[in-house]
Image: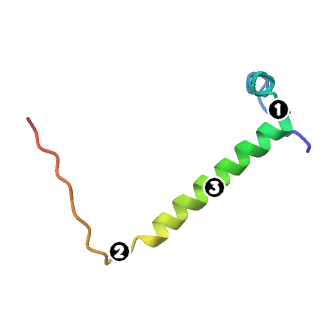
Amino acid sequence: MTIPPMPNDLRVRLDALAEKAGKSVEDCMTQAIQEYVENWEEYHRTVEALSEDEVRPVLKAVND
């Protein structure tokens, strides 16, 4: 995997985390990208599942 250019401070942090985790920088980047994709896929599935015509309860805040 080719590591894309990034700010030096981010690269230093990434290197430190990879070392602490006992993983390669490439493995850490792959994991981060996988989690990013999974989170956004779930977000879009949730948004698509919400029908605009669906009746939903509305919660109201009560002031003390």
Task: Specify whether 27 is left or right of 44.
Answer: right
Image location (x, y in percent) of residue 43: 52, 59
The residue located at (48%, 64%) in the rendering is 46
- Give the quadrant of residue 58: bottom left
Farthest residue, direction right = 2
Q: Nearer the viewer, mark 2 or mark 3?
A: 3
The residue located at (38%, 75%) in the rendering is 51
Farthest residue, direction front = 22
Q: Nearer the viewer, mark 3 or mark 1?
A: 1
Image location (x, y in percent) of residue 10: 73, 27
For this rendering, which residue is in front, 55 or 7? 55
Residue matched to label 3: 38
Farthest residue, direction bottom = 53
Image location (x, y in percent) of residue 62: 11, 43
Image quarter of the C terminus: top left
Image quarter of the N terminus: top right
Disc 3 versus disc 1: distance between alpha carbons? 21 Å
Farthest residue, direction left = 64
The residue located at (53%, 67%) in the rendering is 45
- Numbered badge on residue 23: 1
Q: Amino acid at mark 3?
A: Glu
Q: Secondary structure at mark 1?
A: loop
Image location (x, y in percent) of residue 47: 46, 65
Image position of 14 with respect to 55: above or below = above
First in residue order: circle 2 vs circle 3: 3
- Numbered badge on residue 52: 2
